[in-house]
Amino acid sequence: MTYSPNFEKGNGLVPAIIQDYQTGKILMLGFLNKLAWEKTLETGLVHFYSRTRDKLWLKGETSGHYLVLKEIYVDCDEDTLLFKVEPKGPVCHEGYMSCFYRKLENGKLKIVEKKLYHPEEVYGKA
Amino acid sequence: MTYSPNFEKGNGLVPAIIQDYQTGKILMLGFLNKLAWEKTLETGLVHFYSRTRDKLWLKGETSGHYLVLKEIYVDCDEDTLLFKVEPKGPVCHEGYMSCFYRKLENGKLKIVEKKLYHPEEVYGKA
């Protein structure tokens, strides 16, 4: 597969929206560089480029909560991706199904999801 | 309302996923700077920062297809937004409901949505 999105506009990175292919729930957003894109296509598991750690990041490498790629959509400018996935566990490292577990209400963040696991049991103590 | 997401990690910009609050459909992704964030909260209409045009951009200013903000979600790192919106018309400037009107299949982009209008009738000829 040789198609590649436009990595130049975002200085080598494209954002990918991660959506549960069954429920339609938005799980997270991550950035891919060209290597992450190639690894994702090759393995069928979503890889990102971690801006914080400056390295390739297989989502789930520590937790086992991989994102199995089901469908890929590309936007009109070919600089943003939408991945429909099957999540192998809660996606957020804080223990929630989605990274968007907080809603802004009256200027304050309010938790609107149930915590599904304790992060220290999955990732160890910081 | 004084809450602000973390604009520093993305060099002054945060991505916002735009989702239809009724259907759950992903409509587009855009970037906001601090001014776009403030204008969005102030008006209830989604504003972006256009990377291509380097300016504040009220989505719908030409087409009338505004995005009326219904709910705001913030991710765990507070550097990505999820806006649930009521779209006042098709969102993509190519004439489709969503900017993600193409699916990658066997290495090729395939159009999977119906064209709802002809862009030149809304935006004029290029």
Image: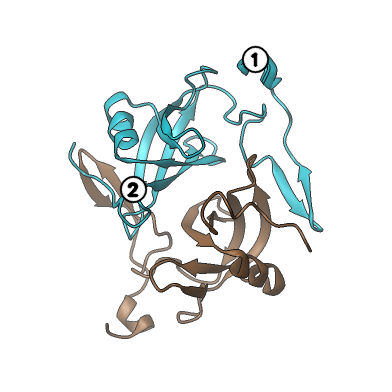
Chain colours: A brown, B cyan
Where residue B26 sits: x, y (%)?
A: 55, 42
Task: Return the residue nearer the eye: A70 or B6.
Answer: B6
- Quadrant of the snapshot with the C terminus of chain A: bottom left
**Residue that badge 1 annotates:** B124
Q: Which residue lies furthest to the left in this view?
A: B2
Where residue B29 sits: x, y (%)?
A: 51, 43
**Residue that badge 2 annotates:** B12
Q: What element carries label 1?
A: loop
Q: In this view, does A122 lie to the left or right of A82?
A: left
State which tag comes first along the sequence, 2 or 1.
2
Tag 2: residue type? Answer: Gly
Task: Return the residue nearer the eye: A117 or A91.
Answer: A91
Residue at 30% over, 54% down = B8
Residue at 61% over, 36% down = B98
Q: What element carries label 2?
A: loop
- Quadrant of the snapshot with the N terminus of chain A: bottom right
| Residue A21 visible here | no
